[in-house]
Amino acid sequence: MIRYGSVAAMLLLLCFSVAISQEVAQEEDTPSPTEIEAIKEHQEGTKLMLEKKYREAILFLQKAIELDPGFKEAYYNLGLSYERLGEYKDAIKNLQIAIKLSPDDANAYYALGYAYYQKKKNKQAVEAFEHAARLKPNNPFTLSKLGYAYLAWGKPERAREQYKVLKTLNSELADELYDAINRADK
């Protein structure tokens, strides 16, 4: 079974997102009152995500986007919240917007790949995971998920390629992918 990642990884992503929000506010000479309010809404939404209160977080993240339609981190976290609730269609929609606003965000491509994978849209999952891997080469979680997506898409030889690279980066994830490949071969 594919795992999304550890709680620690989720916390790191969320903390990174909060830090970016604060950095954006500091980069501008004088953020508008609306931008400041959007950042506050986003921070509250992120806090609720950390508490696994995703439905509540969505309300704050949507408000942040209403206030600042170009707030890429709010779209990203909104996509993650929907993903955690199993609402993959809404996750995909918001993650695509986050990527449009920040095309070099490997984390957004990773999350998009996961949402596609859950919807059994394996070709799109592979494309998203491949893009994430190009942006962040040697990320074991991305390579693992890419291997699973290849496998689900009926490309076990490509999954084996990911396994070979993965075993040099993370033996535990590599072993799990190897087992999945072997089960699929039977």
Image (cartoon, rainbow, N blue to C red):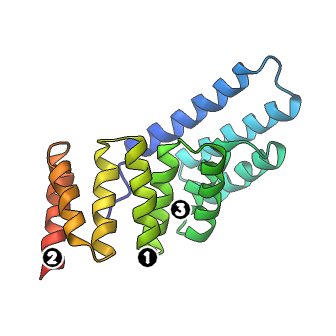
Q: Quadrant of the C terminus?
A: bottom left
Percent position (x, y) of residue 13?
48, 40
Q: What residue is rendered at 24% in x and 64% in y?
A: 158
Percent position (x, y) of residue 145?
33, 59
Residue position for label 2: 183
Residue position for label 1: 120
Q: CA distance from mark 3 to mark 1?
A: 14 Å
Q: Residue furthest top?
A: 29
**Element type at mark 2:** helix
Amino acid type at mark 1: Lys
In the image: residue 185, left or right of residue 89: left
Q: Earlier in the sequence, mark 3 or mark 2?
A: 3
Q: Is residue 136 visible?
A: yes
Relative to 95, does residue 17 appear above or below in the rendering? above
Q: Earlier in the sequence, mark 1 or mark 2?
A: 1
Residue position for label 3: 83
**Element type at mark 3:** helix
Q: Nearer the viewer, residue 169 or 84?
A: 169
Q: Residue furthest right?
A: 33
Q: Earlier in the sequence, mark 3 or mark 1?
A: 3
Q: Residue 180 appears in which quarter of the rendering?
A: bottom left
Percent position (x, y) of residue 129?
40, 56
Q: CA distance from mark 1 to mark 2?
A: 18 Å
Relative to 9, does residue 157 appear above or below in the rendering? below
Q: Which of labels 3 and 2 is toward the front? A: 2
Relative to 71, does residue 90 appear above or below in the rendering? below
Amino acid type at mark 3: Glu
Q: What residue is rendered at 53% in x and 53% in y?
A: 52
Q: What residue is rendered at 66% in x and 43% in y?
A: 72
Amino acid type at mark 2: Arg
Residue 104 is tagged as: none
Sort mark 2 into few (<14), some (14-19) or many (20+) by Cα contacts within 10 Å: few
